[in-house]
């Protein structure tokens, strides 16, 4: 039997068909079709169809947003297809498409980072052309290097563009506000910018470049089960979550909680830190409390440890190191929402007492164990903890915010004895999850 006509076409024709349809069903229809369209060029256009947004830039201030005409670098990015010039009509369909694309085997962290970076580079280069802001060869080289890849830490770059017709100079500050962020913040100053009605000279930054929009955080990315959390998995989640609209992003809360459980069970502090950072941001964006599942505390405390804390007279043992990691994990959970820790729990209290009887964690570990025991026994006395905005207290009811918020002591609880002790245990400074994650700390 002769093969179906579509399968007998040259790969170039199949690729052209797919480029103009970009249907996620085509590569699933046949291994032959999937092989024919497995090229970086096709991958890039599939990515753009799912993530490109319009308009790709927005000016700060109350003035109406002007229309955005694609420049030569953006057009080259999309060739041979036209650049979309209207917002995508169906957000739900894009959510489905993004979930589909992010499950493709070719959709790795490195490839996605390159595509996000290429989109930012194209729109930034075209912006400078449109504004007639020429750079010196030295500054152009610095800009090209700066835009070459999404940086693994918060990064900024300052440039200047002299006006060829006068002695005036335009200053440019470009900022990646957090690691692997998929948007760029710009602050432009100078007479030429001040005369441009699109720019608000009183705002910093006064222009945001966000050519892509992440509308979905897929379950497998949140859960980290491919097959377990890795540095690449943590960075992929951080990149996708770096510039989402917190009130609208599609995600499964069950998958987020599964990711938290996996991070704790696998002793992956980096994953737990990013997930708690994201969980707190989503809770804030959706105006709900920042509670974490109480079972996470029990998972840390309830591990079976052969050999206890190790030999008190030996060098640091594997058991000691595991205890140290568990202390870090437990402290991260406390910093996320201390009130979520189950009170008077025999498993947690037994774990804390075991820390007191061994040298794991040193003096800090012992001090933290005493803190956990005291917090476990502390009577709330009918106190209502309100972690949600818009919480209305009933008449005569005492309402206090949570002890910690986003990894840091809540402003209204700084005078609390337990808060002061916790800060002292960790060296007098407790960084929030935002500072840890967005500052590009170690994973």
Image (tube, rainbow, N blue to C red):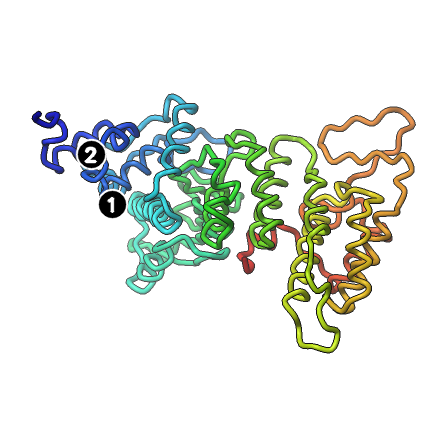
* Residue pictured at 69% horizontal, 51% vertical: 300
Q: Secondary structure at mark 2?
A: helix
Residue 177 visible here:
no
Q: Is residue 200 above or below residue 407?
A: above
Decide if residue 61 is on the left or right side of residue 90. Answer: right
Q: Nearer the viewer, residue 106 or 166?
A: 106
Left or right of 191? Residue 382 is right
Give how far across and how far down residue 428 sits, in percent.
Answer: 75, 62
Q: Earlier in the sequence, mark 1 or mark 2?
A: 2
Q: Residue at x 67, y 46 (%)?
A: 406
**Position in image of residue 168 (x %, y %):** 38, 55
Q: For this view, does 327 lie left or right of residue 436?
A: right
The percent position of residue 92, horizontal first and vertical second, equals: 43, 23
**Looking at the image, is 427 positioned above or below residue 180?**
below
Q: Which residue is mark 2?
A: 33
**Residue that badge 1 annotates:** 40
Mark closer to the observer (1, 2): 2
Residue 257, quarter of the rendered image: top right
Name the residue located 90 percent from the left edge and 42 percent from the top edge: 379
The residue at the far top in this view is 89
Q: Quadrant of residue 27?
A: top left
Question: How far is disc 1 from disc 2 in space, using C-alphas?
Answer: 15 Å
The residue closer to the viewer here, 177 or 111, is 111
- How packed is label 2: few (under 14 Cα within 10 Å), some, or many (20 or more)? many
Q: Secondary structure at mark 1?
A: helix
The residue positioned farthest toward the front in the image shown? 306
């Amino acid at each position: 039997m002769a093969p179906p006509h579509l399968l007998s076409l040259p790969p170039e024709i199949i690729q052209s068909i797919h480029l103009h349809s970009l249907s996620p069903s085509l590569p699933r229809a046949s291994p032959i079709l999937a092989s024919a369209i497995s090229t970086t060029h096709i991958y890039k256009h599939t990515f753009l169809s799912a993530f490109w947004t319009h308009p790709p830039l927005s000016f700060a201030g109350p003035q109406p947003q002007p229309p955005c005409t694609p420049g030569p670098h953006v057009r080259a990015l999309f060739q041979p297809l036209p650049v979309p010039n209207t917002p995508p009509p169906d957000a739900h369909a894009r959510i489905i498409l993004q979930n589909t694309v992010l499950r493709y085997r070719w959709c790795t962290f490195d490839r996605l980072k390159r595509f996000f970076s290429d989109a930012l580079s194209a729109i930034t280069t075209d912006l400078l052309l449109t504004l007639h802001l020429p750079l010196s060869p030295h500054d152009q080289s610095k800009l090209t290097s700066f835009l070459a890849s999404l940086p693994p830490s918060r990064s900024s770059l300052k440039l200047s563009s002299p006006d060829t017709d006068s002695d005036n100079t335009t200053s440019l500050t470009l900022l990646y506000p957090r690691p692997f962020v998929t948007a760029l913040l710009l602050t432009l100053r100078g007479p030429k910018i001040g005369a441009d009605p699109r720019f608000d000279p009183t705002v910093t930054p006064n222009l945001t470049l966000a050519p892509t929009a992440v509308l979905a955080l897929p379950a497998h990315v949140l859960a980290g089960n491919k097959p377990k959390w890795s540095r690449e998995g943590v960075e992929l989640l951080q990149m996708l979550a770096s510039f989402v609209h917190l009130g609208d992003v599609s995600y499964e809360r069950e998958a987020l909680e599964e990711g938290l459980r996996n991070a704790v069970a696998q002793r992956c502090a980096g994953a737990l830190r990013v997930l708690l950072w994201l969980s707190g941001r989503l809770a804030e964006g959706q105006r709900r409390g920042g509670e974490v599942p109480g079972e996470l505390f029990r998972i840390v405390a309830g591990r079976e440890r052969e050999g206890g804390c190790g030999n008190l007279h030996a060098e640091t043992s594997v058991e000691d190191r595991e205890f140290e990691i568990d202390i870090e994990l437990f402290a991260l959970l406390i910093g996320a929402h201390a009130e979520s820790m189950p009170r008077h729990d025999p498993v947690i209290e037994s774990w804390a007492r075991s820390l007191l009887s061994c040298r794991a964690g040193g003096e800090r570990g012992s001090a933290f164990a005493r803190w956990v025991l005291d917090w476990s026994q502390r009577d709330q006395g009918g106190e209502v903890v309100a972690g949600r905005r818009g919480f209305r207290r009933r008449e005569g009811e005492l309402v206090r915010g949570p002890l910690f918020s986003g990894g840091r002591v809540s402003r209204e609880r700084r005078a609390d004895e337990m808060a002061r002790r916790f800060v002292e245990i960790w060296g007098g400074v407790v960084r929030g999850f935002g500072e840890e994650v967005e500052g590009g700390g170690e994973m």
